Image: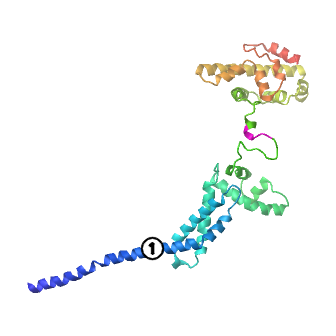
Amino acid sequence: MPDSLAALAVDVTPVRQQQPELPHRNASTASSGRLRQAFENDLVLGYLDLAEALAGRFEARGRERADLNQVAYLGLVKAARGFDQSKGESFPAYAAPTITGELKRYLRDRTWVVRPPRHIQDLRTRMFRAEPELTQALGRNPSVEELAGELGTDPAEVQEAISASSSMHPDSLDAVNPHSDAPSIGELLACPDTPLERLEELACLRDAMQDLDAEDRELLYRRYFCEETQVQLGKRLGMSQMQVSRRLARVLVELQRRLESSSRLGGTAGDHGGGGAARLSAGAGRAAGSTGSCRSVRSVNAGAADDVPVRRIGARARTR
C-alpha cells in the first residue's frame, strides 16, 4: 500500500505543474494580437498617400474630395486587416484594388439622388469610355445609334444612360441662370398661365377625346391647336367649308354629350372627378379652346349645357 500511494503521488505531481502554462499561452496570444494591430497601424499610416492618390482619380463635379478620402481610408484599413505577408510582400499591389473597389461601391450606391438600375450605371460608364475614341474616329460627336452599335446594345438603353446623368445631380427648381434675368424653373412651372385648377378639366377633356375617330381628333387638332381656318381644312380634306363646319359641330356636340355623361357618372359615384366634367359640359368647344389657346371655339354657346340641336351649333360655326 505505501508503494502504491507513492506511485499516485508521483503521477499527480506533473499534473499540478502543467496548470501555469495556460496563462502563458494567453499572454502569447495577446502579445501576438498587439503586434498584429501595430503592424496594421503602421501599414495604414504609411500608405495614406496611396489612398489619397486613388481617391483623386474619382474626383469630379459634385463629389467632395474629403468624402472620397474618407472612403479611401476605409478601404486602406480593410486592406491592412486582410493583408497576409506570407502570400506576398507588396502591400500596395494588394491594397490598390481594395481601395478602388471601395470607392466604386461608394460612387455606385451613395452618390445618386435618383438611383438608376445597375445595368444603366454600367452602360453609362462604358459609354463615357467609348465616346472619346468614337469621336476621334468619326471626327464629330457620335449619334445615339452609333454609340449603341459600338457598345453592342439597344439605342433606347443608350438614351436612358445619357438621361441618367441628370439623376446624379438634378438641377434645383430654385436655381437661376447668373448670366440672364430669366426666372427660376419653379417660377415657370407655377406661372399663372397654367393654373392647377384647370388640370381636372383638361383630364376630363382628354378622356372624352380618347374614343373619337382618328380623323375627328386630327380635325380638332388642326382647327383649335394649329388654328387653321375652315377653308384651309376644306382644301386639306377635299371638303367644302360648309361640310367642315357641320363636321366640327357634330364632333363638338359628341364631346359635349360624353362630358355630360361623365359628369353624371361622377356625381352618382360621389367622385370628385365629376366636377371637372360638369364644368366642361357647359361648352365642349370652350374646353377645347382652353387646351389649345384657340379663340375660334367660342362659337359654341357656353351656357348650352342641355341638348343643343346640331343645326343651331352648325349655324353659329358658320357665322365665324
Q: In which quadrant of the rendered view does residue 260 lie?
A: top right
Q: Quadrant of the N terminus?
A: bottom left
- Magenta segment, principal secondary structure? loop
Looking at the rendered structure, the kind of residue marked 1 is Arg
Relative depth, front residue between 100 and 315: 100
Residue depicted at 85% across the width and 18% down the height: 317
Q: Position of residue 78 (x, y in %)?
A: 54, 67
Relative depth, front residue between 234 and 21: 21
Q: Residues within 10 Å of mark 1 (few under 14, many from 20)?
A: few
Please give the residue where the numbered disc 1 appears in the rendered image: 34
Is disc 1 placed on a helix, strand or loop? Answer: helix
Residue depicted at 82% across the width and 47% down the height: 179
Residue depicted at 55% across the width and 69% down the height: 79
Q: Position of residue 122 (x, y in %)?
A: 66, 58
Q: In which quadrant of the rendered view does residue 199 lie?
A: top right
Residue 307 covered by magenta stretch: no
Residue depicted at 59% across the width and 62% down the height: 70
Q: Quadrant of the C terminus?
A: top right
Q: Position of residue 307 (x, y in %)?
A: 73, 13
Up the image or down, 160 lies above or below 56; here it is above
Relative depth, front residue between 244 and 138: 138
Up the image or down, 266 lies above or below 14; here it is above
Relative depth, front residue between 71 and 210: 71
